Amino acid sequence: MTARQEPAAPAAAIAAAGAGQRRHGSFSLAARDRRFGYGLVAPAVIVLLAITAFPLVYNVWNSFHHVDYLFPAALGSFAGVHNYSEMFTGGQFLPSLYRTLGFTAVSVAVEFAIGLALALALNRRFHGRPLVRAAILIPWAVPTVVSGLLWKSMFDPQNGFVNYILQSLHLPLAHTTWLGQTWTAWAAILVADAWRNTPFIALLLLAGLQVIPRDVYEAAKIDGAGVLRTFVRITLPILKPAIMVALIFRTLSSFLIFDVIYAMTNGGPGDSTQVLAYLNWFAMFNESNYGLGAAISVALMVISLIIAAIYVAAFRTEQVV
Amino acid sequence: MRNWPSAVISSGPRRRPVPGGRVTVLAAAISAAVALAAAGCGSSGSGAGKQVAASAKQTIVFATQGLGSEGTATTTAVKAFEKLHPNITVQILNLSPTSDVAFEQLVQRFTAGSVTPDVITSDVIWPAQFAQSGWLANLSQFKPDTGAYFPAQMATGEYKGGVYAIPWFINAEGLYYRTDLIKTPPTTPAELFSDATAAMKADPALKEGLAFEGDKYEGAVTAFQSMGGDISTSNLANIDTPANKAVLTMMASAITSHVAPSAVSTWEEGQVQNAWLSGQTPFALNWPYIFALSDGKGCQPGCNPVFNKTGWVPFPSPSGTPQASLGGDDLAVNGKSTHQAAAWEFIQYLSSNSAQIARAISAGDPPSVKSAYGQQLYSAAPFFQQEQAVYAAATPRPVTPVYSQISSQLQTMISSVLTGGASPSAALSSTAPTVKQLMSTVSSGG
């Protein structure tokens, strides 16, 4: 910053020309302040543009061009909608989309239910609460790939601890090859995903719960409201913004699930746990077809925006009521 | 930690939700979109720059995999090379020990047009794809002695009339059997199954009769091929053959008849290795490194339950002609490297007899150079003599730039058969057209 230099501010100077000396001074000071402010945020804005806007535009550009390294001669030539049509004719896109949406719906519902229960429990006073609060954060601090590999070994049918526990307790399913069948593989993925992400929901909801004043509950009690009624009429409405944030974050990140599946099943058995992000990764880093990969990315982005828009719309109608 | 979420949901305490929530919604949507878009990047570059002479003072970067004894063997070899060539410094770039991840790490550097690494370690299935993409230097310029190597592995580095990779060490997948439990190794699948069942009856310490890797990854393809599956380049136009059906049926029936545990559909080499070394199976399909673990350097009686009870043969295939899937690593030079001459010196050193034998003894990596198999090697590690029978049956996977896509199709096919998701004939008939179509994309467009 060239702080010593008197800034030349033509617009401000002209506007202030007729005004008195004092006004002129304060005007140019404001302009200088503003410019100094822009100067301060400029590096951050430039970095943000470089790491967000540029890749976004570049990716969309890629999706309309041949960027398949197997055919170096055609690299960068215009492809029209070729990548998008290849995405659909490949036969993998729609089944993967349905799987992804199904998993998103189930995982968000399960994780939200458990997360809410956890948050309510942690909001009560009990001995050792700080310790428990810290403890539930641990899964969230474990990198997803690590937790995926962890659960993969725990679900190992011969040497894993899941079957060991089931067998010790004489429970059914003790001889299940968890990752070897479609539905049990999904169940295992759901467990691994929920183990890691439920604390996130619990934490967001807990923060929301903590700001509800106690006197509201006391008033409800005096009015004779029961536990359920208090929860539905007081806790839930006040908690709604926190719920919305938790749901949106989890829905979008669940829709983009990749690492747990990559670590645990690699899309198998067969292709029964292959999700959209996996397809996207495969096109880019296995086939080195960045054009096709970009098309899938754009599709993921559009669907994510639609999901977000649905939440926005849902939020709006709630607000009117 | 506790402050952060409440800041995110600053509108929380108010009775009526305020628009702040909507801003968060939009922010979430935008950040999701942006995160996605950031995934896509790649750029093309120009040809290699001005070449540095081999005699000049320089540093070359060698990208390789390998931990433990393999890593130590590499460091030792690099030091010996630097002593012979004081003007060349070799810097080791460690890639992921997981083959698929190392592949991605290399592809990312190549697509970015990086001039380093100069020398890369390449799995035998990669050179065709890398060469087709123009990422590797054609080594024909250095007139390599291609006759010195096992022909099946040499073929993995040859593409469209050029030589793009030189074999470093060979690998082939064969059947380990317990010499104390199995008197003569089986020659047919039926014999294998009955021997395994008999052994399980006789020895209660055995948990299963046969261990192999059936998880959905590259290993499933090598297992299929080692058991007799025909995926040679000429057969890819139609893989739906009776012979392939017989192999898939055998793999599935190993599980349904309880010779192999259903867990093999999720096992990789590591689990098979554990099953073998812990003495819980009389038969296991795996690579030669097992020998170095069971009988190798530093091991004595009692160090594991299978010490000196390890035999190794090609897997008895249903067709009667055994195949051993060819693995191993090649060495290749980055097409953009400006140190290609020095890189070639380094490759020549690594494939010299002395370096090959030293690595075989210290790390158990079988030499790719035929002349390395001799008294010097056998006296230090006798099991290499037994390994040659398996290498004689070595069968390469198809040398094609679309190999990774074809492999992915085969993985899905094998995985669905092993897990009972599809019958062998249904899986073959649905996979065959896709594989045929993948092959046609290269022959027409490449």
Image (cartoon, coloured by chain):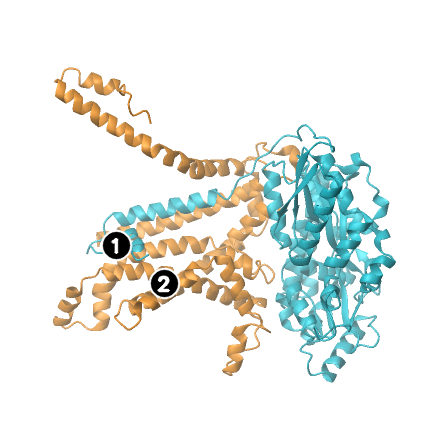
Chain colours: A orange, B cyan
Q: Which residue is mark 2?
A: A112
| A247 relative to B55 in the view: left or right | left
Judge the density around disc 2: few (<14), some (14-19), many (≥20) Cα neighbours within 10 Å. Answer: many
**Residue B39 location, x and y as percent?**
50, 44
- Which corner quadrant holds the N terminus of chain A? top left
Helix, strand or loop at label 1? It is: helix
Corner quadrant of residue B221 = bottom right
The residue shown at (79%, 36%) is B142
Asked if marks 2 and 1 touch (Cβ < 8 Å), the reply is: no
At label 1, which amino acid type do we have? Glu
Q: Looking at the image, can residue B401 be seen?
A: no
Nearer to us in this view, B220 or B66:
B66
Corner quadrant of residue A17 = top left
Helix, strand or loop at label 2? It is: helix
The residue shown at (49%, 36%) is A58
At label 2, which amino acid type do we have? Phe
Q: Earlier in the sequence, mark 2 or mark 1?
A: 2
Nearer to us in this view, A94 or B213:
B213
**Residue A247 location, x and y as percent?**
35, 57
The residue shown at (69%, 69%) is B252
Q: Which residue is mark 1?
A: A318
**Residue B128 location, x and y as percent?**
72, 44
Nearer to us in this view, B158 or A227:
B158
**Residue B330 location, x and y as percent?**
73, 48
